[in-house]
Amino acid sequence: MRITTLAGGVGGARFLRGLVRHLDDALPAEPHEPGQDPARPEITVIGNTGDDITLYGLRVCPDLDTVMYTLGGGIHEGQGWGRDGETHVVQEELAAYGVEPQWFGMGDRDIATHVARTRWLGQGLSLSEVTSRLGDRWGLPRQGVRLLPMTDDPVETHVVVEDQDAEGGQRAMHFQEWWVRHQAALPAERFVVAGMDRARPAPGVLEAIRTADLVILPPSNPVVSIGIILTVPGVRDALRGTRAPVVGVSPVIGGRPVRGHADACLAALGLPTTADAVAGLYADFLDGWLVDDADEGASDLLRRHRGLVVEHRPLMMSDVPTATVIAGAALDLGRRLQ
Ligand code: GDP
Ligand code: FO1
Ligand code: CA
């Protein structure tokens, strides 16, 4: 069985860890050669690279790294991003030299990932090749996971905000500056992805969607994670055209974004923070939609107007076991829609 997922950072990564755990639990107990067990489903993760940024000359890919560290057991659990057991000597030394920016926290262990990535990119490897190399260290292949960047071409999400002092009354800043430095408090007018006009999907991305047995959208940010992946040329068409059922898990619980600033992102599109509004963004390819019990009321509307199969259950991923149960429910819904 081939499962293809689209993923941002923390929400996507926690769901994927649950998915891997659920599939592991379903495997027979006898030992088997790694990669030899035909019963183990292959999971392809198409990761968002719109968050990527170059800082201190290093290429940083936050969402790819969050997925990689979470699956590899190296994530800072409390934060949801970055490395566990982290120290910050390098950034303190950079601060002593007055090197900016200091608003983006980069730990020493994390920096090693960015140094390795930047070095390999400089040697001519594609981002896909680099991501595969980094993922080997974290045991992704052993878990049946193939992590692909959505594109090998450098792209960056920028946020257009109002600024009376700027020409035209607007200015654009990197997504990370808006999200981390300004905590998404400056109302966003729109999101633009620099470089997307020249971007192509990374090798294997469209094929993974077209040939999947099941496509799952984890509870990732619908605008700046999944929404950005959907703007990669060909991705949306592949989702519309795939024979696989497409099942999504709502990132909104009880009208709240759970964590992060998805509400500010939806507001930029003129949308409320509801499970219904998120499903609307995927309406042209979505077959099944899991909402939280708290949003059950909205599901009637979704069923009647969009012909979606909507089911409800608790969707808070409080720990690995709960994420495992949620991933199992998404898989189960997908299997029933096949
Ligand atoms: P980011 O890149 O780190 O912001 O992570 P993602 O884009 O993958 O996911 C962020 C989204 O995950 C947030 O907008 C939340 O709405 C959603 N989210 C986070 N934790 C949970 C959870 O426990 N349950 C559900 N259903 N959604 C969650
Ligand atoms: N998020 C923050 O809120 N503050 C930070 O200083 C920060 C640093 C950081 C460093 C590496 C990394 O992989 C992720 C980091 N994040 C940080 C999360 C980052 O903003 C992600 O892009 C989130 O996925 C937001 O969508
Ligand atoms: Ca992100």
Image (cartoon, rainbow, N blue to C red):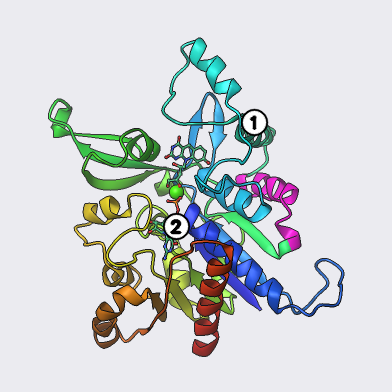
The residue at which mark 2 appears reads as: 229
Decide which of 208, 31 is in the foreground and name it: 31
What residue type is disc 1 on? Val
Residue 313: % across, % down: 42, 78
Q: Is residue 127 left or right of residue 221?
A: right
Q: Secondary structure at mark 1?
A: helix
Residue 46: % across, % down: 54, 59
Q: Which dot, 2 or 1, sits closer to the camera? A: 1
Residue 40: % across, % down: 73, 75
Q: Is residue 185 left or right of residue 57?
A: left
**Dot 1, crowdedness within 10 Å: few (<14), some or many (≥20)?**
some
Residue ID at (52%, 43%): 62
Q: Secondary structure at mark 2?
A: helix
Is residue 132 covered in magenta?
yes
Is residue 238 covered in magenta?
no
The residue at which mark 1 appears reads as: 115
In the displayed structure, would residue 120 be above or below residue 239? above
Q: Is residue 297 left or right of residue 10?
A: left
Residue ID at (44%, 23%): 102
Q: Which residues are magenta?
A: 127-142
Decide which of 152, 100 is in the foreground and name it: 100
**Dot 2, crowdedness within 10 Å: few (<14), some or many (≥20)?**
many
What residue type is disc 2 on? Ile
Residue ID at (83%, 72%): 36
- Separation (CA) of disc 2 from disc 1: 25 Å
Q: Which secondary structure is most common in the magenta stretch?
A: helix
In the displayed structure, would residue 70 be above or below residue 31? above
